[in-house]
């Protein structure tokens, strides 16, 4: 790395740190009132909720488009220094929470019987715990559209997870780990599989290194 390129990199990082200092979406007061809703008066709560909702809508409508533009157009070598794996994970969790709020439901049925397709409305806050099947109803066109959209996104995500025609060992580890929870089944897990599970467990504890 040349002296000029190093100086340029440090300038970018210092500008980013300076920007981060005043770029938060919520003010300290808004954040405190949101976290402590029970201890806030009805009037303050209503006013705070309205301001926060407006900010969220504007971020979704405008800032996300700008983020997409930046990620598409800015050279990758400029982005790798500031983006982290956690950024990707956090955005996926946000998507899951939005789908939870919007009542996305799994679609079930046979392709040749579209009039019989059903969806199962799952319990709220399922993103935070184990999915639980709830009320069943007939699928509408929006349910079908959402399933099609999710299928497209899952295909994109799978490119980063599995090579076509192969099985990611992490998937196998999850199946084996479930057997280890039962004394009558844990003998089915081989020593080699246990070593694989141990490697994955250790890897998940590694802190992310800066690029």
Image (cartoon, grey):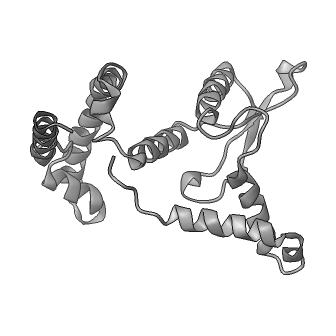
Instruction: Please state if 107 lies on the left or on the right of 130 as rendered.
Output: right
Foreground of the two, 3 or 28 = 3
Can residue 185 be seen here? The reply is: yes
Quarter holding residue 155? top right
Q: Position of residue 114 (x, y in %)?
A: 83, 19
Quarter holding residue 115? top right
Q: Position of residue 57 (x, y in %)?
A: 31, 30
Residue closest to the far bottom: 183
Q: Position of residue 96 (x, y in %)?
A: 52, 43
Q: Position of residue 113 (x, y in %)?
A: 89, 21
Which residue does the image show at 25% across and 42% down from the upper left? 52
Instruction: Please state if 93 lies on the left or on the right of 69 as rendered.
Output: right
Which residue does the image show at 63% across and 40% down from the upper left? 161
Can residue 178 be seen here? The reply is: no
Quarter holding residue 38? bottom left
Which residue does the image show at 78% across and 32% down from the upper left? 118
């Amino acid at each position: 790395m040349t002296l000029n390129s190093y100086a340029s990199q440090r300038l970018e990082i210092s500008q980013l740190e300076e920007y981060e200092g005043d770029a938060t979406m919520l003010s300290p007061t808004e954040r405190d009132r949101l976290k402590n809703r029970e201890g806030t008066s009805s009037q303050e709560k209503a006013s705070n909720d309205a301001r926060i909702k407006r900010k969220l809508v504007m971020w979704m409508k405008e800032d996300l488009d700008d983020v997409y533009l930046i990620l598409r157009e800015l050279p990758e070598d400029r982005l790798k220094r500031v983006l982290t794996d956690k950024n990707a994970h956090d955005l996926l969790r946000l998507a899951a929470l939005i789908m939870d709020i919007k009542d996305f439901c799994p679609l079930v049925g046979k392709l040749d019987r579209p009039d019989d397709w059903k969806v199962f409305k799952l319990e709220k806050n399922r993103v935070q715990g184990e999915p639980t099947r709830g009320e069943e109803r007939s699928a509408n066109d929006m349910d079908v559209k959402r399933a099609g959209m999710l299928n497209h996104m899952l295909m994109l995500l799978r490119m980063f997870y599995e090579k076509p025609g192969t099985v990611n060992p992490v998937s196998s580890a999850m199946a084996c780990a479930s057997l280890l929870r039962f004394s009558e089944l844990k003998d089915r897990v081989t020593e080699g599989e246990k070593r694989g599970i141990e490697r994955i467990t250790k890897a998940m504890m590694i802190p992310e290194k800066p690029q």
